Amino acid sequence: MIQKILFLDIETVPLKYKYSELNEREKKLWDAKWKYNPDILPEKQYEKAGIYSEFAKVICIGLGYITKEGNLQTRILSNDNEKELLIEFNDTLYKFYQYVFKNYNTEYN
């Protein structure tokens, strides 16, 4: 059954690397996230920006699965253009689905 599991590792980075690079609108949005935690400056909190979807983008997706023969098969998708990366990821998921589940409904017929 482990052959039907797809393991994923998704890596993100901030859209802007420093709080000082944000425009006023972005700073206002970021500051609103932390209004209930005033003890830490927004500039310091911004080190976590890469894990918040509104301030980050996906740059790399690692995939792995166990083949029917018991071997580990891996693939790394990376692209600085998040849209292109997610389209490639979608296409890869479709191929994986076809590979793993192509006979799923016919095994018992």
Image (cartoon, rainbow, N blue to C red):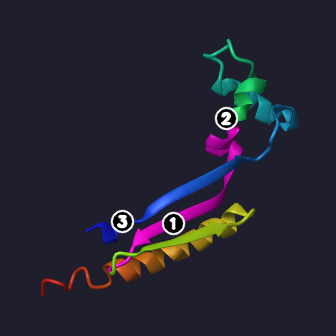
Quadrant in the picture for residue 107: bottom left
Residue type at tag 3: Ile
**Mark 1 or mark 2: which comes first in sequence?**
2
Residue contact at pointers 2 and 3, CB within 8 angstroms: no
Q: Secondary structure at mark 2?
A: helix
**Residue occupying image coordinates x 44% and y 61%:** 7
Q: Secondary structure at mark 3?
A: loop
Residue 63 badge: 1
Location of residue 90 in the rendering, given as x and y in whole percent from the top left corner:
53, 71
Q: Quadrant of the N terminus?
A: bottom left
Q: Secondary structure at mark 1?
A: strand
Q: In this rendered view, identify the residue nearer to me: 60 or 28.
A: 60
Quadrant in the picture for residue 35: top right
Distance CA(mark 1)–CA(mark 2): 24 Å
**Residue occupying image coordinates x 42% and y 69%:** 65
Residue contact at pointers 3 and 1, CB within 8 angstroms: no
**Residue occupying image coordinates x 59% and y 62%:** 61
Specify start and end residues of the magenta stretch as a single range.
48-68
Question: Is residue 60 highlighted in magenta?
Answer: yes
Residue denoted by label 3: 5
Location of residue 89 in the rendering, given as x and y in whole percent from the top left corner:
56, 69
Q: In this rendered view, identify the residue nearer to me: 93 or 27.
A: 93
Residue denoted by label 2: 48
Which label sits in the foreground, 1 or 2? 1
Residue type at tag 2: Lys
Residue contact at pointers 1 and 2, CB within 8 angstroms: no
Q: Is residue 47 above or below residue 39?
A: below
Location of residue 41 in the rendering, given as x and y in whole percent from the top left corner:
75, 19
Q: Quadrant of the C terminus?
A: bottom left
Residue type at tag 1: Leu
Distance CA(mark 3)–CA(mark 1): 10 Å
